[in-house]
Amino acid sequence: MIYLKSLDSGAVVDALMTAPEAEGQIAYNAAMDGFNFLRNRLPLSEIAAQVLRYAQFPRRRRLRRKGALIRDCLPGFARGKTPSDCSARPYRRASGSETGVTTPTHVDEWNNVACGGGGRRRFTLFPPEQIANLYVGPLDFAPTGAAMSMVNLA
């Protein structure tokens, strides 16, 4: 936490928080007229502090930080990197902030770096020709900003 704070510029990033009953699933609400999470804007180190606080509870709120430009929110991370590293391109820090958060299948239009401080991550990739089988939800009304699939992969 101390190391993260030393790199954090204080720039705010989007954070999504689900209620305990959502069990970490980011989705539309039952009426399809809103979402099952609250959106907040905080610096990365404050999001990490919230994750640590909530981790004490067996049924807890879960947080996911949306992708943010590394050069804006963690400028210290880019120092000392070569031009081929993330300091030279607009990479986003796009991993979730907590184990147990599931982001629906979606398309990212950015170069991303997926990283985690602990636990494990799993990605399911589909070829472009499978888009018809993924039942993409409303393009102008997406929970995470990217068009997402209505299919629960489980």
Image (spheres, helix red, strand yellow):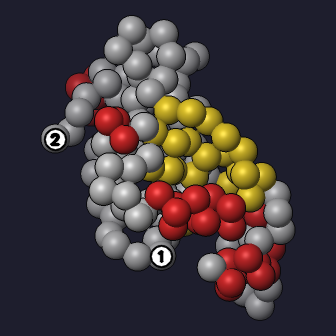
Q: Is 148 in front, or is 120?
A: 120
Give residue 73's quadrant in the image: bottom right
Residue drawn at x 62%, y 36% as measured from the top left? 39
Residue furthest bottom in the image: 80
Q: Which residue is mark 1?
A: 117
Q: Is 119 in front, or is 131?
A: 119
Residue 14 percent coordinates (x, y): 66, 45
Does residue 36 appear to the left or right of 73 in the view shown?
Answer: left
Give residue 11's quadrant in the image: bottom right
Alpha carbons under labels 2 and 1: distance apart: 25 Å
Residue 153 percent coordinates (x, y): 20, 39
Residue 89 visible to the viewer: no
Name the amino acid type tagged 1.
Gly
Residue drawn at x 44%, y 49% as measured from the top left? 62
Name the amino acid type tagged 2.
Ala
Residue 81 percent coordinates (x, y): 72, 86
SS at mark 2 in the image: loop
Residue 104 percent coordinates (x, y): 37, 38
> Any mark on residue 154, and which?
2
* Category of crowding for the residue at label 1, using alpha-carbon neighbours closer than 10 angstroms: few (below 14), some (14–19), many (at least 20): few
Residue furthest left in the image: 154
Residue furthest front in the image: 57
SS at mark 1 in the image: loop
Residue 109 visible to the viewer: yes
Where does the C terminus fall, quadrant-wise? top left
Whether 19 is drawn above or below 120: the answer is: above
Where does the N terminus fall, quadrant-wise? bottom right
* Category of crowding for the residue at label 2, using alpha-carbon neighbours closer than 10 angstroms: few (below 14), some (14–19), many (at least 20): few
Residue drawn at x 48%, y 76% as measured from the top left? 117
**Which is nearer the N-term, disc 2 or disc 1?**
1
